[in-house]
Image (spheres, rainbow, N blue to C red):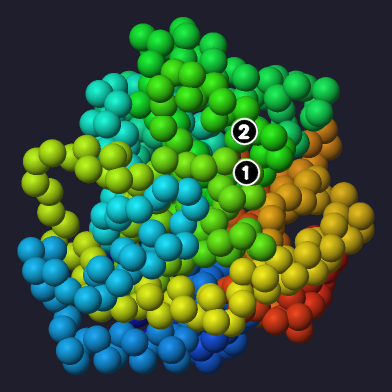
Amino acid sequence: MNKQEIIDKHRKYLFSCVATYYDEPLVVDHAKDNYVYDIDGKEYLDFFGGILTVSVGHCNEKVTKAIEEQTHKLQHASTLYPNEPHVRLAEKLAQITPGRLQKSFFTNSGTEANETAVLIAQLYTKCQDVIALRHSYSGRSYMALSLTGNASWRIAPTTVPGIHHIPNAYCYRCPFGLTYPSCDLKCAKDLEEAIQTQTQGRVAALIAEPIQGVGGYITPPKEYFKEIVSILKKYGGLLISDEVQTGWGRTGGKMFGIEQWGVEPDIMTFAKGMANGVPIGATIATPEVADSIKGMTISTFGGNPVTAAAALATIQVVEEENLVENARVMGKRLRDGLEALKQKYPVVGDVRGMGLMQAMELVGDNKKPDTESLKRLFEATKKHGLLIGKGGLMGNVVRIAPPLNVTKDQIDQALKVLDQSFAQLGH
Ligand SMILES: Cc1ncc(COP(=O)(O)O)c(C=O)c1O
């Protein structure tokens, strides 16, 4: 098929809600390492990694080899029959996740991972109420939609009862109009009043992304999660850390995002980058929380041997190639470059994030969200061969997240393209 045929069939045969980037959608043909090639053969440096999913480069040889070997050995068994890749992956997660996290349940997506997390928290605490953060994204099941704190993605009315949203730690646009640190972490402290006024005085859990992904890489102050956890524990709640975007070294220097904030979660969820693009979801919990599902449950494809082999190989590459440290070092280089762009172009109102998860919020006068400039920046960067992402409640945030094995030259190349593209906006 040629480009136009693919675009036409995409429009004709897929749900119209399957949104695509760019005025003319970019039809991808193939990809290798940190580069993607469109159907006309044009090369793009990939600084979004299929939404923070290509952790160790496209079609990574070691991951591909693991998939190929496992495909020839055992492709599917279901959870009814124990198999080695399934238990090896569970054991690996128990070894590398913090604290007492020990037992895993595998699914196929972040949505399912979060569903599982909330379910076990509710069963364990025998409580229905769950706290989520505004600007969050949790997925697209009814529960996950109800947890999501962003109207653009809430495609159905709220249907799941017992979910309450508190303001997030969005310092650039403080929900209380305050300034850090004199704010005294009002946003975290608000949790206590939320529990006291919106629940019976007990909660099952608080679910949070250590850095909000879809929300536009909103990064809380360093004491935020400690304050949250101290309040949460008073009311019997568990902390669910949604690591779908922040896991596997993405935030630099630590394997998981929540480790940046010095607290131990009771449950963690994963998806996206865990298997370098092979569909996977995982929920890990402390033994007593994990074992609170008393009946039987099944996920036909959860822990599939090929998927598990891909995840094990991805984690092995992250460890062997020291990519958690690479994310820290390259993340700093990227951040310094973005800060320089902020000095040069007033349209860049805020630069935030950690490691290889960096964002720029584009604004006009008085911090007015500038979605038009973001749209133009997208077209310009595409033309110059760079893929970036977007996010934020108002869709005015550039999200940058290259694969974890990104090189110095690739960072410099991306910064050069961003500079050229901002210059073309003419601000
Ligand atoms: C933080 C977070 N949680 C959950 C999800 C849902 O994951 P999935 O799309 O695999 O269902 C996403 C997806 O973007 C996410 O960013």
Q: What's the residue type where badge 1 is placed?
A: Gly
Q: Residue 391: x percent and y percent?
A: 58, 50
Q: Quadrant of residue 370?
A: top right
Q: Earlier in the sequence, mark 2 or mark 1?
A: 2
Q: Position of residue 69 (x, y in %)?
A: 27, 91
The residue nearer to you, when weighing 213 against 347, is 213
Residue beneath disc 2: 226
Are the two marked residues, 2 and 1, in contact with CB atoms closer than 8 angstroms? yes
Q: Is residue 75 visible?
A: yes
Q: Nearer the viewer, residue 314 or 360?
A: 314
Tell me the SS state at disc 2: helix
The quarter of the image holding the N terminus is bottom left
> Could you tell me which residue is drawn at 75 percent across and 36 percent down?
172
Q: Position of residue 159 (x, y in %)?
A: 27, 27
Q: Amino acid at mark 2?
A: Lys
Of all residues shown, which one is farthest toward the right?
A: 344
> Which secondary structure lies at badge 1?
loop
Q: Is residue 334 above or below residue 293?
A: below
Is the residue marked by circle 2 packed among few (<14), some (14-19), or many (20+) residues within 10 Å?
A: some
On screen, residue 104 above or below 83: above
Quadrant occupied by the C terminus: bottom right
Q: CA distance from mark 2 to mark 1?
A: 7 Å
Position of 163 with respect to 69 (left or right) is right
Residue ID for mark 1: 262
Residue at 36% over, 91% down:
65
Q: Nearer the viewer, residue 296 or 141?
A: 296
Can you say whether 129 is above or below 95 in the image? above
The percent position of residue 129, horizontal first and vertical second, equals 34, 22
